[in-house]
Amino acid sequence: MTVKETCLAAKANVNAVAFLTEEERNQMLSIAADALVARAEDILAANAHDVEACTRGDQFKDRLMLNVPRIGGIAEGLRKLREIPCPVGEVIERHTTESGLEIERVRVPFGVVGIIYEARPNVTADAIGLCLKSGNAVVLRGSKDAYSSNEAIVGVIKDALKGAGYNPEFIQLISDGTREGAQEFMKMNGVLDVLIPRGSASLIRSTMENATVPVIETGTGNCHIYLDETADLQKALPILVNAKTQRTSVCNACESLVVDRPFAEKHLPEVIAALREKKVEVVGDEDSRALCKDILPATEEDFYTEFLALKISVKIVDGVDEAIAFINEHSTGHSDAIVTENKENAEKFLRGIDSACVYANASTRFTDGFEFGFGAEMGISTQKLHARGPMGLRELTSYKFLIRGNGQVRK
Amino acid sequence: MTVKETCLAAKANVNAVAFLTEEERNQMLSIAADALVARAEDILAANAHDVEACTRGDQFKDRLMLNVPRIGGIAEGLRKLREIPCPVGEVIERHTTESGLEIERVRVPFGVVGIIYEARPNVTADAIGLCLKSGNAVVLRGSKDAYSSNEAIVGVIKDALKGAGYNPEFIQLISDGTREGAQEFMKMNGVLDVLIPRGSASLIRSTMENATVPVIETGTGNCHIYLDETADLQKALPILVNAKTQRTSVCNACESLVVDRPFAEKHLPEVIAALREKKVEVVGDEDSRALCKDILPATEEDFYTEFLALKISVKIVDGVDEAIAFINEHSTGHSDAIVTENKENAEKFLRGIDSACVYANASTRFTDGFEFGFGAEMGISTQKLHARGPMGLRELTSYKFLIRGNGQVRK
């Protein structure tokens, strides 16, 4: 099928998921999870084919590779979705106008959600699960490096749903792996209601630049930690080390340390020593290097860079206002934190930082649907339109107005 | 100033509006309204210059032209905005996690809103008012045909705000009237938080196709009225005539009539006569023409067309399911209505039609912020991302998460 035919097939079957009950959709999640486990061998065989054909590096291959525990984890993710209440159908507000019109705003699925992603087969099942649970049809466009794996996962889930009497054609996988196919997918206006890129900064940028359908920008996180004059060193060190080193390849990891001058003058060497103990490469501005000889010179580019590695940039500022201005200039609007014992500065920072998640005295690593108590997420939105921060089930819905009258006309 | 410089100027002054109190912003609306009235002569002189230079048709000139009553109306619109409560600052939800993090989701302004529009100077003041009230900076890009008028309106408002001690630089007007300038404006990622096109279908399409910043699609309304078998003729005729003829140039006017066969067999000639009495040109499919000789043949294109004129297309269907399928295929997702005495069919239609506003037994002309009781609107969104239907103050906001901790790190 062409890209267009694939998208139209999802659209034609949108009611096969939108009009089911939550109980039915939960049952489908169970069926899908069971099938993935039961047919793990088929999936692993297809995956082995992809891994064999792959000429990329080890890190790439590791993300591509599936095994029995990984498939178990994917299935468990689908099962967990059953427990998260789905907001579809919720009456958000309701009122009656003077002319007697009853106006109801109700939450509805988007309709058709497009997902464009890289060579991570787990995203295939995750995205199917989130779309299914939120009543959306889904069109998946993964990397051609993972096509056999994706085809196997989609096939196993669709076979199982069909076997249980459900129409599974609201799930569609694009087989066209060309760049032109991706471009066509991004311009499926009138068919795709929203397109969500999941993956690297370059995939997200390319999607933003080329798509004509509405896109939700996710992911890139150049996250900052600001140590204010009154920061408690016993909180600052664990927060910084956690945010920088607990997991470096994730979007909520810290990439830049901003330090108030009086605090830096007292504690910067200790702070840097704590990072270097964890093998973090530290680059910084001249002021920071004057205070601590272990800091290498930073380029201007470093302050805009999401390292996703054991590397951090350091900037010295004069007070919370300069910190806010510096962070708003360099942050990607994902997650930024202040460490301070000064409540006024904390509130100023919370209010002034223009990011999806702003922390006082906690690690940026908490920006995550599960950590926030919202459950599984499709990604972290760094744009302000529609969704900001963790995008869970609610963020995969829209609303519409239902207006019930009795012959009213406008005067 | 270049397009980029103009946008950056708005961004640099975003806090000049975002951090004011609602009382201050209401005062600014009063000041702006008073200034427009007091300096109406300056505005009219600039407008006369635009109208004189304009070589377009009468309808175009009528939209471009200002006069004292029109300026009074624009000022009154700004004053009315003071009464609508602004949702900025609202705590949407709040909870504490097991680890003791207090998570708050609060409503915030977008930041910088871009508006691209045609030669209607009233949009200049409306957009400034809505952005000001919702705490947003605004970059306006009107038509070059209305540039003198826009410059005068913006100048009068900014002078008055400055005179009252406010920094008015969160309001910016793009002076570059070239097509390249418009393209550049649509790609101001990292500066514009959202871009809203207001105007014709072609402007909206061009914005959707060219913008890389998040866009809200507004406006185009190919709205349908479906007369079900059990429709009450005494409700159907006024609803249809109101929706088609009360005002033809608006997006919530009816463009297509869909009739259930049994109803058409009984009443179609009467229905068409009521439209023809209002001088409506009626085109229809073969089945409708067999039932009523006053119907001219419709092209396939007619069923996809927003006429914005005294013209309507007619389609005969067999039952509510076919009506829903036909409307979902041809509608622009703006407003569609069923007229029926069958409650089950009404609910089926309300649920099944994939449009922003779905009506049972009322005119589509009610799709309007004021009619819904929400107050002034920036437009009617026909997309599903972020906002759907009337876009008022709430739809000009985003949210962010504030997380207050006490040294928490992620395990």
Image: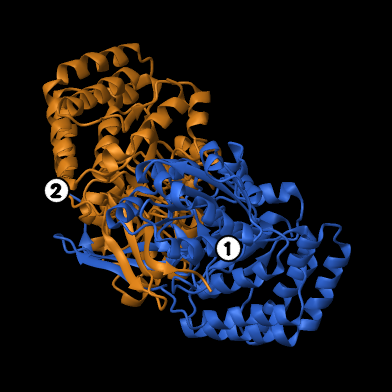
Chain colours: A blue, B orange
- What residue is disc 1 on? A11
Quarter of the image where one finds residue A275: bottom right
Circle 2 crowding by C-alpha within 10 Å: few under 14, some 14–19, many from 20: few
Which quarter of the rendered picture does the N terminus of chain A lie within?
bottom right
Q: Is residue A215 visible?
A: no
Label 1 and label 2 in one chain: no
- Residue A341 placed where, x, y %? 33, 59
Q: On what subunit does the disc labeled 1 rest?
A: A
Quarter of the image where one finds residue B142: top left
At x 36% / y 44%, what residue is drawn? A319
Where residue B83 is drawn, which disc sits there? 2
Quarter of the image where one finds residue B49: top left
Residue B184 versus residue A288 in the image, above or below: above
Circle 1 crowding by C-alpha within 10 Å: few under 14, some 14–19, many from 20: many
Identified by mark 1, the residue type is Lys
Secondary structure of the residue carrying tag 1 is helix
Residue A278 versus residue A283 in the image, above or below: below
Secondary structure of the residue carrying tag 2 is loop
Q: In front: B300, or B82?
A: B82
